[in-house]
Amino acid sequence: MIEMEEILNFQTVSRSLPQIDSIKKATGEAKYTVDIKLPRMLYAKVLLSPYAHAKILKVDKSEAERIPGVRAVMTFEDIPKVKFNAGAKFNHLTPLPDDEYILNDKARFVGDRIAAVAAESEEIAEGALKAIKVVYEELPAVFDVEEAMKDGAPKIHEDRENNIVAHISSDFGDVEKGFKEADLVLEDEFRMPGQQHLPMEPHACIADYSSDGSVTIWSSTQSPFQIRFMVARIMGIPQDKVRVIKPYVGGGFGGKEDMFDEPLAVVLSKRTGRPVKLEADRKRDLAAMSRRHPAVVRVKIGVKKDGTITALQLTTKMDAGAYCTSSPRICGAHGGRALAIYRLPNYKFDGYTVYTNTLPSRAFRGYGNPQMTFPVESMLDMAAEKLGISRMEIRLKNCMQAGDLNRLTGGVIESCGIKECIKRGAEAIGWNEDRPREIGRNKRRGMGMAMAAHWTSAVPRQTESAGAVIVFAEDGTANLLVGASDIGQGSDTVLSQIAAEELGMELKDVSITSADTKVTPWDAGTYSSKVTYLAGNTVRLAAADAKNKIIQKASKILGVHPEALVCKDKRVFVRTNPSVGLTFAELIEKLRQSGEPQIIGMGNYGGYSNPPTYVAHFAEVAVDTETGEVEVLRYVAAQDAGTVINPLLMEGQMEGGVQQGLGYALSERFVYDKKTGVILNQSLLDYSPLHSVDMPPLKTIIVQTYEPTGPFGAKGMAEGAFNPVAPTIASAIYDAVGVRIKSLPITPDKILAGLEKKEMR
Amino acid sequence: MIEMEEILNFQTVSRSLPQIDSIKKATGEAKYTVDIKLPRMLYAKVLLSPYAHAKILKVDKSEAERIPGVRAVMTFEDIPKVKFNAGAKFNHLTPLPDDEYILNDKARFVGDRIAAVAAESEEIAEGALKAIKVVYEELPAVFDVEEAMKDGAPKIHEDRENNIVAHISSDFGDVEKGFKEADLVLEDEFRMPGQQHLPMEPHACIADYSSDGSVTIWSSTQSPFQIRFMVARIMGIPQDKVRVIKPYVGGGFGGKEDMFDEPLAVVLSKRTGRPVKLEADRKRDLAAMSRRHPAVVRVKIGVKKDGTITALQLTTKMDAGAYCTSSPRICGAHGGRALAIYRLPNYKFDGYTVYTNTLPSRAFRGYGNPQMTFPVESMLDMAAEKLGISRMEIRLKNCMQAGDLNRLTGGVIESCGIKECIKRGAEAIGWNEDRPREIGRNKRRGMGMAMAAHWTSAVPRQTESAGAVIVFAEDGTANLLVGASDIGQGSDTVLSQIAAEELGMELKDVSITSADTKVTPWDAGTYSSKVTYLAGNTVRLAAADAKNKIIQKASKILGVHPEALVCKDKRVFVRTNPSVGLTFAELIEKLRQSGEPQIIGMGNYGGYSNPPTYVAHFAEVAVDTETGEVEVLRYVAAQDAGTVINPLLMEGQMEGGVQQGLGYALSERFVYDKKTGVILNQSLLDYSPLHSVDMPPLKTIIVQTYEPTGPFGAKGMAEGAFNPVAPTIASAIYDAVGVRIKSLPITPDKILAGLEKKEMR
């Protein structure tokens, strides 16, 4: 009941407010790392390996060093010999191998960091790279995950037994028993490619190493505190001497969750005594930085006649690329944690993450979930067809509901709007309308649907936590300090809304400073769709702490019971007699006079609950049977994220998720030269993500539930918006032309091949 | 007893550590406001009135506006019509009149702000100033405080009845009764000049007004939160939208306690949409910004034969200059608060602050105390001579002791080392040695002494308060956030020492961020010698809060009573069995795993106690009876400041105090053209402060006491180091040549005139 009251009374929360920094972003006043120019700043460039696998026999940097304007040339010889894992998170149960250096002693993929130059201009630095003479000895390379698993495959990391980074397995129930109980058992294999994050702002950082042994880093990052942790470790300096500042960030999508060039910029700055900027150009960002894990997934599913799933088994091979980063965790999430959408009595998962001589795979929106959702949703469609039940029916039969076991935490699913998502999504797309199949010459229409859930954080595998401090000014406005990183998604706005709501203030009366390791409390980083939920809970705690102090102090001054007091419009007053009260400014003045100068609230929160967001997507497509081309005619995305703190921003996430998902489904992939491992489509034009003009008419439906463990009922949502897109499109294509595509992206040639095969049958 | 234990066990406190930023300062890496250059930054210059008193009939700015590179020309017409008082402090009992605008509508002194230009370069701005055509109507002006008090004097602020800003009076006992009880009653008048603060860095600020209505200000200030308060008020924006950042500051001495050009830079930035820098050149800083209050002080003192003071009466006329700022408070401090050094049974004070057409007087090291100490100490010398007792005896007879009433707070003087200061100072100078009077041709030697006390803050007239937050990093090092401003004196170092001491950490393991209104807690500002004491107490509270949390949490994890635990070297452990414990890093990791990610401590402190620092100075001088020149042969400064947190830094303050005091005593003053009010000595050469080569051999003696209300026993000291210099020198000159000089500075012509007069007698 109290929750419903809260919902009814929201003032700042649940409102579609523009991002607090939208004007600055629109005017260009907002400074991104790439915009920052420090006095005496040098520009660094990195020499990338042209070989997929090679020993470095000799490096001669003397000529490069002699070029006027070159201030430092560094190779493996010059860097701290500390191996690290760029994806290392705090507090984890899945250990990750340290397998790379700031500059590597061996080339393991085309694009590996071999040497670096800092110079007076980017042009000079680029020129100097060409003057570094490296003698390589090429080694046999392996680019395919299954090839790399074979005995005798080229060993990528010498100190390891083989290329398998980790084998993760998990299970519950008894799948063999489950398959026996099934009326239908299907087994099939699916292949998913890598995908580039493509944030608007490429990776960039600046390091300024001071004569006093401290260092300041500006980084386009999702995880400034992780960079602090790792730079301190690599450089051997205390963490209080490493300041990582996150300026405005132009998107991350997981690609900025890990550390990249930051420690390299630090060593170059230390060497030169000057600030050093290291900015990846679009080509390097696209082809040599990171990607989503390519995966081969074998699915076996057992289903009863009525559609009830009796068992599910997944066997996955994930391509980690040349360096591990968080791969085993992503594989674990893929297999063990992404299954929040269906009730499964029996389940078994085996996942292998494997080194190959390709660019490293890293975290990416979905974190293993899309590689599970495409196969499983496709299999459900296949099972429904075999059983003669509808695609919707099989999903409604098996989907989670509030009150079900939350397998991740051992708790209970408290909020679940999936049935409402299906209902409203189906209505919006006209799921039950009888529309003509044929539209125009050679064009067939089809409808598809798919579902997914996504957890709101990485707990309990990883402890997720955040901190916040709120300090009041004399006029009763407040400054909020939060560790969490706004990477463009608008968390600064959402967290300010939460603070304002708790305090009964207007949004404009709260100003936020976030993600600066020297001045804000600690935060694990922006990933796992958790900022609104986790940092939101923390901010609410900090605001509640401040409010409690305000009420306790006012209670004494006014001589009324604290429970009689409420806060609104920067004023604390008696609920039943609003004329009796104090403005915050008056209260602060009185407190100061009595020796307590300020109101400071503190939030210190580590989450354990992990409520999933629920998503149902629907699409209508037209497939050209002559060209194989797919046109998405309409798209409907429905999602439950609890109380939505800012519907406008959620809508943006939903739209972005669909756009990125359509690229994953239909066009994005890396094209490798099979002999050299060189990526052939290194430009945006060739890589071909969806542009805004390519987007179909899209309807977003927000299904509001109330998640009691979240701030004002909220839970995470950003990754969920991506997960079901590819199977939705595949489902619609099958509906249109009867071709089941089991590998992404679904390119025209695959459809044409499928149509041909079908005709041959 | 507990205090003595603390003294014995100090690890970080009481050590002469170099300033934490000394390397950055030495290398030039430390950035002062004048060093900051923002992209697209404009440069502003201010048109200063050439007249001491004039109506502005017309301003034509059209020609200036047409100059290429000029981006804005502003006059009174263009600014917010909000009157303010640049010295306005928070929470006070002495109200101050609002009497000035950002740009004034009338010229009230030579140097008054009439118009301003923002342009692409300083040169263009300077040129544009010359193109602004102002038609003035000169008005009769008054430059002398006593003239200005007369009926019919030119009225400087039209809306006031006369030029008297305020009449402050205070008394206790009954002076008339006291004078009757005296064996000797003396009355005399003393005159003290203005003095310039002369910080190494002149006044400077930069404002960057954002399109979203917020503004960031970088200012060379002592009081960033005061600037926030006033800019918010003048601009009509909430305080959370005003960010004031104090970069490194090159000295203040009170001259940067008030606001200067900050709101002018803000309106120029708002108008142009670009950052605007406004830097005063040395000439403006010296002759048109601010000074110590010139004062005429009449003293009447009653003394018994044995030297006991029976009554003291002061009547003071203080020259506020053209705008009030904090003048009435400084006058009040001068009369009612600076008397912490002697036991006075009967006391009466009347003080007048008066407008004149001279540059505004403002806070300056001593805050009215020097204008009291010179007359009163001189009078004591005169009384001692008349009574035939020694100058030391009369002081020992009357000086305060621990246990005496603290007249300011109604409490008790808890620590008082004045007798020890006298004893050790006298020993060091050789007070009782019998040295020859005549040294060389026409040179006579003399010794002088004087004493003073100075309060540690402005309480209880003003509530003084500060805030601090300390946040631990994962490796157990800590970041400290403090509102207090380091203006070169080293408070960042001292406050870090205090935090480290409380936590048992090394200084290097604590990093500080101070005085940034958006990220640090509130602080009243750096003035009143209070930072070590007041912000120090606050920081200690924050550290103690963090330590308490560490101990409470560790107690539960280790299963030992919290009182059994101590913290040292980033570890919490059992005092009697140090092997049982946790490093801070281990504790933080365990806490995070259990859902409480961080250790944050908070300090929130408003002082009421106000313990004085005690100072005794001794000098030996040689006076040339032919030229009147004074050579200071040796100088000894002894001071009690409780526990000295950093003796090296205290020594620096003592040396600086003596240097500035010798300038006040012997050379510094403004020379006015009596007709126009123009200051004739506008350069450092002509103004002639003491240079380092002019300094006598100086011995500093630190007398350590323990002040129970201060952090680890500390109290304030910086202003105290200045106060007794002038009377010490005057005392020595009289001792040498028998000439009593009652006006400062003591220039050769005054001595020669005195010698002449003496001969004539």
Image (cartoon, coloured by chain):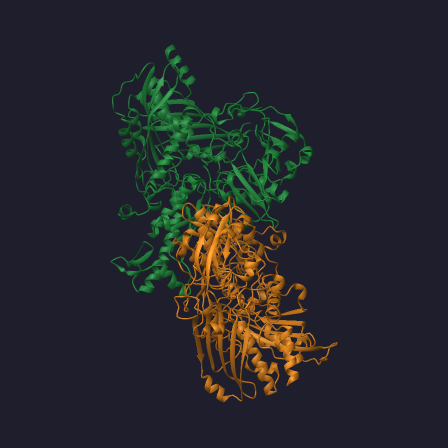
Chain colours: A green, B orange
Q: Seen from this angle, which residue lies furthest top?
A: A760
Q: Nearer the viewer, residue A31 or A464?
A: A31
Quarter-wise, where is residue A743 in the image? top left
Q: Is residue B577 visible?
A: no
Residue B388 appears at what percent x and percent y? 61, 87
Q: Residue B405: x, y in percent? A: 48, 77
| Residue A367 visible within the image | yes
Q: Is residue B244 left or right of residue A541?
A: right
Q: x%, y% of residue B291?
A: 53, 65
Q: In which quadrant of the rendered image does the C terminus of chain B lie?
A: bottom right
Tally the numbered discs.
Answer: 0
Q: Is residue B718 left or right of residue A337?
A: right
Indicate the position of residue B132 as horizontal and vertical percent values: 48, 52
Q: Quadrant of the N terminus of chain B?
A: bottom right
Residue in view at x 37 percent, y 36 percent = A652
The answer to whether B219 appears left or right of A565 in the picture is: right
Q: Which quadrant of the structure image shows residue A591?
A: bottom left
Between residue A173 and residue A431, name the one nearer to us. A431
Q: Is residue A141 above or below residue B666?
A: above
Question: In terms of depth relative to the viewer, which is nearer, A131 or A372?
Answer: A131
Q: Quadrant of residue A385?
A: top left
- B696 to A298, vertically: above or below: below
